[in-house]
Image (cartoon, rainbow, N blue to C red):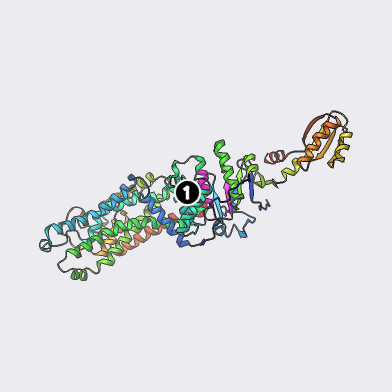
Amino acid sequence: MTLTIDAPATGLLGQNGAGKSTLMKAILGLVRLDAGEVQVLGHDARREGEQVRRRIGYAPEHECLPPELTAADLCRHLAELRGLSRADAIRRASEVLFAVGLEEERSRVIGSFSLGMRQRVKIAQALVHAPELIILDEPTNGLDPAQRAEMLDVIRRVSRDLNVRVLISSHILDDIRRTCDAVVVMRNGAVKLARPLAAEADEADVLRAETVADSAPFVAAMTVAGLDCTVLDTTTTRVVIRSERDRDVLRDTAASTGVGLRRLHRDGPSIEDELLEAIG
Amino acid sequence: MSAAKIHDVRYRPYDGEVTGSSRRAIISMARWSALRALGARRPWTAKIVPVGLAFIALGPAITALGVKALLGTQVTQKLPGDLVPYGPYYQLIGFAILAYAAIVIPETICPDRRSRVLDLYLSTALSPREYVLGKIFASLTPLLAVTTLPLAFLYVGNVFFATYPLAYVQDHLREIPAILGGGLLIALVYTLLGLAIASLTSRRAFASVGFILLMIISTLISGVLRHAANLGPNSRLINLQGLPIWLAQKMIGESPGIIKDGPLKHVDTPDVGLLILMNAILIVVCVGVLVLRYRRSDA
């Protein structure tokens, strides 16, 4: 596979066993590659794994937190392991636990935490040494809807407010859509699709309007109003909507020309359709 | 009304120093692991075993010095030997040392595999070598206190109760490095052995039972060889229960005590050269097991 990941938040999407976790471990330099090259933040992950891991934070998918430690102690310990002084480790532990919404619980042992809180501790420890990139492997796995929504908020805040690049894996399309700027779809260990998600808005504005009567007066009026229209057949027209005003013009023109708007829908497959097809 | 927005998320990009210091990582791993094994920041039940064993190890020294304090130096000076000599002291506290290695050392390493924290550690810049070194220091330091502090305490007490303290120090100067060296040797061997066994399992109980069984089996085989094959003291070379202790005793010197029986009974031990060789082999084997268990591919 050949892949470049450079968006502020990128989602790795694919079914279980698609190769998402393996790709993440390859980025961290934790698996031996038979061939190929992985460049991470200017380092070769195969040969300079330690330098790569020093600049990256990682939250594994599985349970990996010591239940007898407090959240603050764990973050302190991992900060020290990553090269921070003891004083800095204490301060950073406090900051990252606040950032993930666990300030009140920082002195509680992790064993008493809910699954959602433990997932947030994983993100906190990944952030504690101020990495340039954090890798989150299935961070919403096993969470109930409320915990999942909170977790997605935290992840979005990390990339938007804290300016830390995020690479997140998930097999849930909605998680990726809500948190990421770009998506990479994997299937059977190969990249099936890689695209920005920001383009979704542009594509959503190409609509197909189906009218009851002949659409000629409707098309003429909309063209006069400045809308970009393409006649597909006598009752079907493709209309490009660039603003809310365009949408209003379309509605008002249909009413004023009396063509009878039978159906208005997005033209072509949606990004959701595209992603679902790629996931397989 | 203006739209207000909170910009302070109390998170600042960190611009302090992030060293790639291997020493700092090892010290951090050792400190946190030792604190956990000793029961720090945990319920009092977690502290009973390590603290209790440390007190048991101190027991003979406290008793010997207590007798001196009660009877006075006028009486104890007339005794034909020390109440508790330095060399055989390890025989008295052998149980505490072995129990410590069997119970406390697995606590430093087994939970990391059981709760899969090891994966998290190795996903940082921490290398398996640094991890293992940190665990060795975490286990060695408290065990060193068990093997060294009682004798050091006894030595200081003997100096205090001596009629001529400076003369006592002068006469027993050789014992100071021997006490430190012997304590270090015992602690190192049992630390590595305890860690090697504990590295084979994620369950503390299995590690403890494995350690105890190894001690019992090696003692039994040694006894069988001694009596059935008539191998003499050299049969004790495979007795892991005494291997480092006998070498430490030989380092300190086997000064006679006034009690000749029971746990202070004289034991015929193998030659020093053979003891050194067997201890070295044991250390190499244990290190080999640790290296194999913590290769990167095992993470």
Q: Residue furthest front?
A: B1
Q: In the picture provided, is B100 more to the left or to the right than A143?
A: left
B226 vs B166, nearest the viewer: B166
Q: Secondary structure at mark 1?
A: helix
Q: Which residues are magenta?
A: A118-140
Q: Which of B201/B52 is in front?
A: B52
**B95 drawn magenta:** no
Identified by mark 1, the residue type is Val
Q: Is residue A203 above or below residue B154?
A: above
For mark 1, what is the residue? B117
Question: In this view of the protein, can residue B257 be seen by the observer?
Answer: yes
Q: What is the chain letter for disc 1?
A: B
Q: Is residue A137 magenta?
A: yes
The residue shown at (30%, 47%) is B48
Q: Position of residue A122 (x, y in %)?
A: 52, 47
Q: Nearer the viewer, residue B106 or A238?
A: A238
Q: Position of residue A11 (x, y in %)?
A: 64, 46
Percent coordinates x, y for residue B60 in the rendering? 21, 55
User: Which quadrant holds residue B63?
Assistant: bottom left
Residue A206 image position (x, y, % from top left): 78, 40
